[in-house]
Image (tube, rainbow, N blue to C red):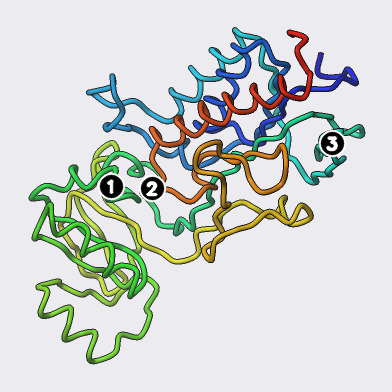
Amino acid sequence: MGGERLMYDTIIVGGGIGGLQTAIQLARSMRRVAVIDTPGGRSTVAKSYRNILGFEDGVSGVSLRRQGRKQAAKYGAVFFADEVVKLESQGKAGFLVHRRNAVQPLECRTLVMATGIKDPFPAIPGIEECLGTSIFLCPDCDGYETIEQRTAVIGAVPQAIEMADELTFYTSKIYIINHEQVPVQPELRKTLSEKGYTLLEAAVERMLHDEGRLRQLILATGEHLDVTRAFLSFPGAQVQTALLKPLSVRLNPKGHVLTNPRTKETDHPNLWAVGDIVEHSQQVAIAMGDGAQAAIWIQKRLREQGFTERR
C-alpha cells in the first residue's frame, strides 16, 4: 500500500501522542490515514508519565507510542518512517507531501501537523539515563516529584529563575545552576538572595545516578552537589513549524501555531495542527484531546465536501 499512488483522506506529519490519537480516531471513522514520522520527539525521552488517567504507576512515552501505533494500525492507518521535507497546497484538491526518501509525493485531502517541539538538551554525561525519571522539563507535569527534595534547576538565567519560582510551591530546597554562564546583574543577585535561592555559577560536568535516580551533580569547579531531582531550563526550544512557511499559517510570537479553539484547524483551509506545536500547556492529555478533536472535525469536513466513501 505504501507504494501506491492514491489519495489519502488525511496525512498526519508526526507520530507522537497527538498525531497517534488523531490517527486512531480517523481510522475508526473509516478514513484512509497515513502517519509520517521520524525517530525522536519529546515523548520518547519521558520514561514515566504519572499524571495520565488510568496510569497511577506511570507509563513511558515509548510505551504509549508503541501502543498507539498498534492501535491505529489495527484500524487501518498506514505508517511511513521518513522525514517530510516539503508541503504543497493544491487548493481545493488538497496537499502534496514530499518525503526525503521517496521520489513521488503522497497526496491527501486534509493535513494534520503534529511535529511538536525540539528541546535543547545539554550534552552532560548521565543526563540521558535520568531524563524522565529524576530530571524533568515541565513543572506542571512533574513538580509533584520534587516535594521536599533537594532540587537543582540547571540552565540559564533568567529562565532558570522562572522555573525555580514554579517549583517553590513543592520544595524550598532549590539550587539554581547557571550552566550557560550568563552574566548575572547585581539587582538580580539581590532578588535571588531575597527568594532564598542558592546560585551556583558553574557548568555541570557530570551527573551521578543509580539507574536513572539522580544523586549528585559534579560541577566544573570540582564541587559535588547532592541533589535528588533536577529540572532543565534552557532557552532555545524550537517549535517545529518550518514546513508551514510556504502555507502562510499564522503563528503566535513564540512560534506556536494558532488554531480554531473548537476545531484545531489552522487559518489555512483543510490544515489542522495538534499537540505541542499548538499554543497550550504541553500536556499529554491535552495532545490527546487535540488529536481527537481535530479528527472529529476532519471527518465532518470530508463528509461536507462529499467524500462519503468509506475506506
Determine whether 156 is above or below 105 in the image: below
Left or right? Give the position of 83 relative to 298: right
Q: Nearer the viewer, residue 153 or 261?
A: 261
Residue 302 sits in quarter: top right
* Closer to viewer: mark 3 or mark 1: 3
* Closer to viewer: mark 3 or mark 2: 3
**Mark count:** 3
Percent from the top left, x then y, of residue 118?
A: 54, 51
Q: Which mark is residue 68?
A: none
Q: Pointer 2: residues within 10 angstroms few (<14), some, or many (20+)?
A: some
Q: CA distance from mark 2 to mark 1?
A: 8 Å
Q: Nearer the viewer, residue 138 or 7?
A: 7
Residue 286 sits in quarter: top left
List the residue tagged with mark 3.
Answer: 92
Q: Pointer 3: residues within 10 angstroms few (<14), some, or many (20+)?
A: few
- Tell whether label 1 touches label 2 (CB within 8 Å): yes
Q: Nearer the viewer, residue 245 or 35?
A: 245
Quadrant placement of the C terminus: top right
Q: Nearer the viewer, residue 2 or 282?
A: 282
Percent from the top left, x then y, of residue 216?
A: 21, 54
- Sequence-earlier tag: 3 or 1: 3
Q: Amino acid at mark 2?
A: Ser
Instruction: Identify the residue at horizontal 23%, vertical 92% (top origin).
Output: 186
* Closer to viewer: mark 2 or mark 1: 2
Q: Which mark is residue 281?
A: 2
List the residue tagged with mark 1.
Answer: 140
Percent from the top left, x then y, of residue 74?
A: 59, 7
Percent from the top left, x then y, of residue 167?
A: 19, 57
**Of helix, strand and loop, which one carries label 3?**
helix
- Tell whether label 2 touches label 3 (CB within 8 Å): no
Quadrant placement of the N terminus: top right
- Sequence-earlier tag: 2 or 1: 1
